[in-house]
């Protein structure tokens, strides 16, 4: 198991890579570490934030994919119907785009500060884009 720190704005979450369930996605993401971006609030999916990544190609297909992540689960959508993105659920989610339902690879699970996820969602919704950074713990 590889431990990570996921920092969103001023809040640090501990996390684990789901290497047993999504080994190719985890390996591809580790090659990009440390990984930084900005999260924005989703438009169609419900209670989640996402990092739009355009045509960035991680070189992976579907593995351990879902359209209904639980709060604290992070998905990588490898692109195809919509642009590549990373999605973090903070509440109820039905992962979708303007093209319809999507499924992403569940490859990271937050393991601490889960009670602060809703705060991140509300902050992103009302204050706009927030910085995010993924580092090895």
Image (cartoon, helix red, strand yellow):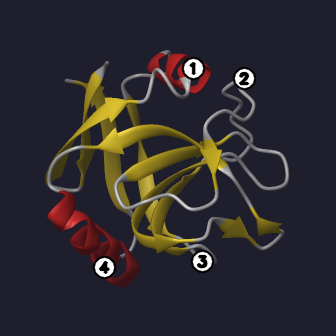
For the residue labelled by badge 1, is the local secondary structure a helix, a strand or a loop? Answer: helix
Q: CA distance from mark 3 to mark 4?
A: 14 Å
**Circle 3/circle 4 CB separation < 8 Å:** no
Q: CA distance from mark 3 to mark 2?
A: 26 Å
User: Which residue in the protein does label 3 denote?
Assistant: 43
User: Which residue in the protein does label 4 denote?
Assistant: 122
Q: Position of residue 72 (x, y in %)?
A: 34, 54
For the residue labelled by badge 3, is the local secondary structure a helix, a strand or a loop? Answer: loop
Neighbours of disc 1 within 10 Å: few (<14), some (14-19), many (20+): some
Q: Position of residue 82 (x, y in %)?
A: 78, 56
Q: Residue furthest bottom?
A: 126
Q: Quadrant of residue 129?
A: bottom left
Label count reads 4
Quarter of the rendering occupied by the N terminus: top left
**Circle 3/circle 2 CB separation < 8 Å:** no
**Circle 2/circle 1 CB separation < 8 Å:** yes
For the residue labelled by badge 2, is the local secondary structure a helix, a strand or a loop? Answer: loop
- Earlier in the chain: of badge 1 and badge 3, it is 1
- Earlier in the chain: of badge 4 and badge 1, it is 1
User: Which residue in the protein does label 1 denote?
Assistant: 28
Residue at horizontal 71%, vertical 30%?
Answer: 57
Q: Which mark is residue 59?
A: 2
Q: CA distance from mark 1 to mark 3?
A: 27 Å
């Amino acid at each position: 198991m590889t431990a990570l720190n996921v920092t969103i704005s001023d809040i640090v979450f501990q996390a684990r890579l789901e290497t047993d369930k999504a080994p190719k996605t985890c390996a591809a993401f580790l090659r990009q570490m440390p990984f930084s971006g900005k999260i924005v609030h989703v438009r169609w999916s419900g209670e989640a934030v996402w990092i739009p990544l355009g045509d960035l190609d991680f070189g992976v297909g579907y593995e351990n994919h879902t359209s209904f992540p639980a709060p604290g689960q992070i998905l990588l959508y490898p692109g195809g119907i919509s642009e590549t993105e990373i999605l973090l659920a903070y509440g109820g989610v039905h992962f979708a785009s303007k093209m319809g339902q999507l499924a992403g690879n569940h490859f990271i699970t937050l393991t601490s500060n889960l009670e602060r996820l809703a705060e991140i969602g509300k902050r992103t919704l009302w204050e706009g884009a927030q910085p995010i950074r993924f580092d090895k713990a």
